[in-house]
Image (tube, rainbow, N blue to C red):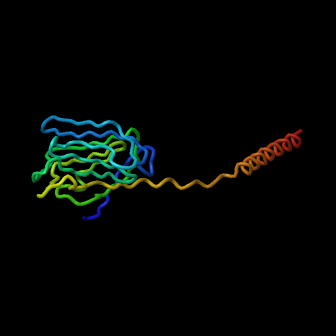
């Protein structure tokens, strides 16, 4: 697998992790005008959601971690299957800006799945699967899995600013005002 990283702009509050963030997921299959929605989930341990990409044939398990989104194709029947995903799309929508600033491929490489299939906005992670090729060779068992996914980078938190010594600043301001008052008083007495 070639390690390539793509940077993108994600305005909004930067997070250092996806843990604890809320997402909803939608699987869109435009060819057949079908959409499958999942309930909102909070990123934590284990599989967050599952969707049957092809009911009775393939299920996609989605596991989101602190810095990655891993999708695993799971066969739902034991006969051999070769499947190319045609014009399908997974959309993961965060309830607030997720803070992702870059991404790379994660998990096993899959034919037809590359960086051009991933789009990141301030609140969305979009994975297009128009050319993804999955091949479940015989004998197929229920434990066979084909993982693929994306890892993320986040903006570094801003460095802490230099602390301003407030008492010293106020003392300096007071001394300046006292000096101005003294100069003004001196001018008045000189003019009188």
State the residue lying farthest toward the bottom: 2
Q: How many marks?
A: 0
* Quadrant for the N terminus in the image: bottom left
Left or right, residue 168 beside residue 145:
right
Towards the viewer: 80 or 23: 80
- Res 28 → quadrant: top left
Towards the viewer: 106 or 78: 78
- Res 56 → quadrant: top left
Instruction: Indicate the position of residue 153 as horizontal and vertical percent values.
Output: 38, 55
Left or right, residue 23 beside residue 53:
right
Q: Which residue appears at 30% of the width and 54% of the height?
A: 150
Towards the viewer: 163 or 144: 144
Instruction: Indicate the position of residue 72 as horizontal and vertical percent values.
Output: 25, 52
Instruction: Indicate the position of residue 105 as horizontal and vertical percent values.
Output: 28, 58
- Res 34 → quadrant: top left
Q: Which residue appears at 81% of the width and 42% of the height?
A: 181
Q: Which residue appears at 26% of the width and 36% of the height?
A: 37
Towards the viewer: 97 or 88: 88
Q: Which residue appears at 46% of the width and 55% of the height?
A: 156
The answer to whether residue 31 is above or below residue 8 is above
Left or right, residue 176 beside residue 140:
right
Left or right, residue 159 beside residue 190:
left
Instruction: Indicate the position of residue 51 as horizontal and vertical percent values.
Output: 24, 42
* Quadrant for the C terminus in the image: top right
């Amino acid at each position: 697998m070639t390690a390539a990283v793509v940077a993108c702009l994600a305005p909004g509050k930067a997070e250092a992790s996806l843990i604890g963030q809320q997402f909803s997921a939608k699987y869109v299959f435009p060819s057949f005008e079908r959409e499958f929605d999942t309930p909102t989930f909070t990123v934590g341990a284990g599989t967050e959601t599952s969707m049957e990409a092809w009911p009775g044939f393939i299920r996609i398990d989605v596991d989101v971690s602190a810095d990655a989104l891993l999708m695993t194709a799971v066969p739902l029947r034991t006969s051999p299957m070769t499947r190319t995903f045609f014009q399908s799309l997974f959309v993961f929508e965060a309830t607030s800006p997720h803070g992702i600033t870059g991404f790379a491929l994660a998990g096993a490489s899959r034919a037809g799945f590359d960086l051009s299939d991933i789009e990141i906005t301030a609140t969305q992670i979009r994975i297009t699967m128009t050319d993804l090729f999955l091949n479940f060779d015989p004998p197929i068992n229920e434990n066979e899995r084909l993982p693929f996914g994306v890892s993320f980078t986040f903006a570094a938190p801003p460095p802490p600013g230099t602390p301003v010594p407030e008492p010293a600043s106020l003392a300096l301001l007071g001394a300046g005002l006292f000096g101005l008052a003294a100069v003004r008083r001196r001018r008045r007495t000189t003019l009188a």
